[in-house]
């Protein structure tokens, strides 16, 4: 059985109890980190996971609240003796900037650094990311301020599925990506350029006929904006849950 652990649920401004939005997908053979912020090694340890078990990292887009922890993660894994290779996936736009960022740290001069393979994804719907005995992952472009992908996970043993919108305005690409999934994790930062409100996320969930809606990347702390699950329930009849840090979904 695979599981998805929410490592962070806040929008771009985290709080003491809620980190920026990112998550990890854990199967029997692969452990896939989706975005990378904060102190990743510590965050994974808090979730009961060993950072060295990471096999893959997907970077959805190049905004600080989604990629800022990647240099620290790579450096810490190197300093702690990692030898196994790791795969990093993202759009050309994203990975060009990731490589440029790491270049500023002169990572090519770090001695005995473990192998890193960059996999550039096309900016087209249902692009294959990876397929293993536990799950298949595809990506689709969504509508954010910069090139960004949403993701779909189909879990082979259980025939269950999950879609993650990432940061996006409401768009048909997310509807198609999430069509018929058991769980849609959709951002709910608010009704403004590049983002969606809880009600808009619920409309997407209804159009895609998903089994359950989880709201993520919402305002937290002093920026919190009331009961957004109630807002969502006016537009979607299925179960609505507010994602929280370290929440675990099993598939």
Image (cartoon, rainbow, N blue to C red):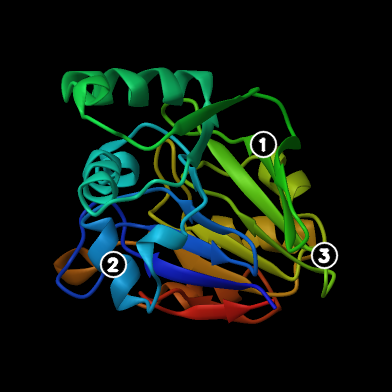
Front position in the image: 59 or 237? 59
Q: Quadrant of residue 68?
A: top left
Disc nearer the start of the sequence (2/1): 2
Which residue has dot 3 on it?
156
Q: Are marks 2 and 1 in contact (CB under 8 Å)?
A: no
Measured in 3D between alpha carbons, the distance from the residue under mark 2 to the one under mark 1, in whole angstroms, is 27 Å
N-term mark: 3 or 2: 2
Q: Judge the density around disc 2: few (<14), some (14-19), many (≥20) Cα neighbours within 10 Å.
A: some
- Relative to the observer, which residue lies in front, 87 or 236? 87
Q: Nearer the viewer, mark 3 or mark 1?
A: 3
* Residue drawn 56% across the image and 55% down it: 200
Task: Identify the image quadrant of the N terminus.
Answer: bottom right
Q: Which residue is nearer to you in this view: 219 or 49?
A: 49
The count of marks equals 3
Q: Position of residue 25 (x, y in %)?
A: 55, 63
What residue is pinned by disc 1?
140
Q: Is residue 241 left or right of residue 97?
A: right
- 106 relative to 145, above or below: above
Q: Residue at x 31, y 62 (%)?
A: 10
Tell me the distance, in whole angstroms, between the alpha carbons under discs 3 and 2: 27 Å
In front: label 2 or label 1: 2
* Front residue of 204 and 184: 184
Q: CA distance from mark 3 to mark 1?
A: 20 Å
The quadrant of the rendering that contains the C terminus is bottom right
The mark nearer the N terminus, 3 or 1, is 1
Identify which residue is drawn at 46% across, 45% down.
Answer: 167
Q: Which residue is mark 2?
A: 43
Q: Give me the residue at 63% from left, 47% from top.
A: 151
User: Residue 52: horizontal and vertical position, in percent?
Assistant: 39, 59
């Amino acid at each position: 059985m695979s599981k998805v652990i929410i490592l962070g649920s806040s929008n771009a401004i985290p709080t003491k109890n809620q980190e920026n939005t990112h998550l990890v997908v854990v199967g029997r053979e692969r452990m896939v980190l989706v975005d990378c912020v904060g102190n990743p090694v510590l965050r994974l340890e808090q979730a009961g996971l060993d950072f060295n078990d990471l096999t893959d990292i997907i970077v959805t887009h190049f905004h600080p609240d989604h990629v800022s922890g990647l240099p620290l993660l790579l450096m810490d894994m190197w300093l702690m003796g990692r030898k196994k290779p790791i795969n990093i996936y993202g759009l050309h736009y994203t990975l060009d900037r990731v490589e440029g960022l790491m270049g500023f740290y002169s990572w090519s001069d770090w001695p005995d650094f473990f192998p890193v393979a960059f996999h550039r994804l096309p900016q087209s719907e249902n692009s294959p990311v990876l397929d293993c005995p536990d799950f298949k992952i595809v990506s689709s472009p969504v509508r954010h301020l910069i090139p960004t992908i949403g993701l779909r996970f189909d879990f082979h043993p259980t025939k269950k599925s999950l879609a993650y919108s990432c940061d996006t305005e409401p768009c048909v690409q997310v509807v198609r990506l999430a069509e018929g999934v058991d769980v849609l994790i959709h951002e709910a930062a608010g009704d403004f350029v590049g983002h969606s409100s809880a009600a808009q996320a619920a409309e997407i969930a209804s159009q895609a006929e998903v089994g359950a809606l989880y709201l993520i990347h919402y305002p937290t702390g002093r920026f919190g904006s009331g009961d957004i699950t109630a807002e969502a329930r006016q537009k979607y009849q299925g179960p609505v849950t507010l994602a929280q840090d370290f929440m675990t979904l099993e598939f």
